[in-house]
Image (spheres, helix red, strand yellow):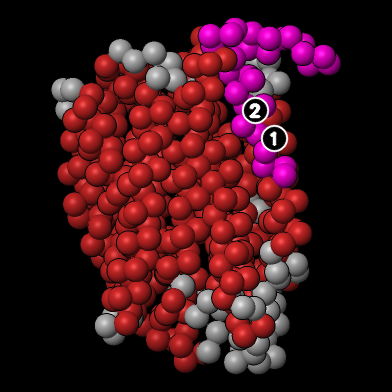
Amino acid sequence: MAQSQAGLSPARSWWAIFIFTIALMFNYLDRQLLTLLITPIKADLGVSDTQVSLLVGFAFVLFYVLAGIPVARLVDRGPRKWIVGFGIFFWSVMTAACGLAQNFWQLTLARMCVGIGESCNAPGTYSMASDMFPRDKLAQPISVIGIGTVAGSGMALLVGGWLITWLTDIGPQSFPVVGTLKPWQMTFVLVGLPGVLWALLMVATVPEPPRREAAGAATPGFTDVLRFLWNLGATYVPMFLANGIKAMLSFGVAVWSPVFFERKFGYAPGEPGPVLGIISLVVSPIGLVLGGYLASRLAAAGYKDANMRMVWLVTIPLIPVAILYPLVPNATLAFALVGVSLFLGSLGSGPANAAIQAVTPGRMRGTTTALYIAIYNVLGYGLGPLVVGLLNDHVFGEEGVGYSMAVLACVAGPLGLLMAWLALKPYMHAVEAAEARGD
């Protein structure tokens, strides 16, 4: 074994986890704010549900994926905290730039740039966290980092909902240089800029941990990483697909939930946001912390496949809940089922990410994470919302958005469950091999 985590105190390691968590919160806040602004953007820019789906998903994902691999190669070689810090700064500025867009193509370009910035976050963050904590304890800190995901999504709904309501009341405002901005544009600007300050705090206070790796290890080439993943394809392929297909369900439903409550139950634009945000902020952190704890307990009980076993187990009850949620006849029950769905989904989120880090050699983690995140985002954030948008435009109509969401759950849920089950045994063997390598 090379250097261990002994160079960092537990306090410094957990401070880094706190910084990573809030950074991820800004990540998802900036990424998902658009889902709350669909109605005013459609009205101002004259776009269809399919175009909105592309704007929310593939406009972001395309450059996220294209930038992700070269960024990950830098993560495996160089100072990870500076890479993550730059990413936070850049995506925050580009989120504010979304508020300056005057047409669909300008907004699309800004969203692509947000994707470039956010591609820096996951490879660097997870690589650093994996060198701060031992393998059998990793699910818990990564689950805590995952709170940033749900906190960001929840804050996008809560703060974004409040902002869009308040800014709509005061109407368009004129500013020096940029001219007149509409309420949805001002929302982007106000939400984007605070991340710049967090980027500065990140580079000033987070330590660069020593890499945990086998003695004499060097950074492998990209083809070496691909060869390693190919040789362990029975482990990585179903693991990547299980998490990606589940993300397809999660994001497909989450992106369209505010619009679902507006169209089915008559809420005003932005009005469902605070309720959805509060639900997310209450139940999801509980699920994330509990999921990490349960995975650690399973590992302590001798289950080598503890992380993927958690992913598989929580998907079983998630499927019927995800199907029923958009079909129920009243808003109160729908909100309740949103809470149950978010809780169940968050139980497996931390273990899913920890599973990949636990079986991947130290200097391959950045590249492997980038490849995983590419699949995760193309399936989840790209294809999930697009499927719902296409079904809205060509099958059920705008008012049938609930049926579109239910169809997605009927297909993606069972398929994700199958992939998680196929990953269990190969993953167990991969954990044993990683322990033998000592990385």
Q: Is residue 250 above or below residue 49?
A: below
376 sits to left or right of 429: right
Q: Magenta stretch?
A: 168-197
Query: x%, y% of residue 170?
Result: 58, 8
Within 10 angstroms of label 1, few (less than 14), some, or many (20 or more) residues? some
**Going by the image, does 303 lie left or right of 191?**
left
Q: Is residue 234 visible?
A: no
| Residue identified by numbered label 1 | 193
Using the rendered view, name the quadrant where residue 429 is placed: bottom left
Indicate the position of residue 437 as horizontal and vertical percent values.
Answer: 52, 90
Residue 185, magenta (yes or no):
yes
Which numbered circle lies on residue 190? 2
Against 284, residue 101 (above or below) is: above
> Left or right: where does residue 145 sit relative to residue 118?
left
Residue 302 is at least partly visible in this image: yes
C-beta proximity under 8 Å, tags 2 and 1: yes
Q: Nearest the camera: 328 or 364?
A: 328
At x 70%, y 82%, the residue is 218
Q: CA distance from mark 2 to mark 1?
A: 6 Å
Q: Secondary structure at mark 2?
A: helix
Give the image quarter of residue 60. top right
- Depth check: give the residue in front, 200 or 377: 200
Q: Nearer the viewer, residue 163 or 256?
A: 163
> In what element is the residue under mark 1?
loop
Residue 270 x/y as whole percent? 44, 20
Residue at image location 39% in from the left, 52% down from the top: 285
> Badge 2, how many Cα within 10 Å: few under 14, some, many 20+?
some
**Left or right of 71 in this view: 404:** left
| Residue at 28% in and 37% down | 338
Q: Single out the residue that lies furthest toward the right.
A: 177
Residue 87's x, y, as percent? 70, 49
Residue type at numbered disc 1: Leu
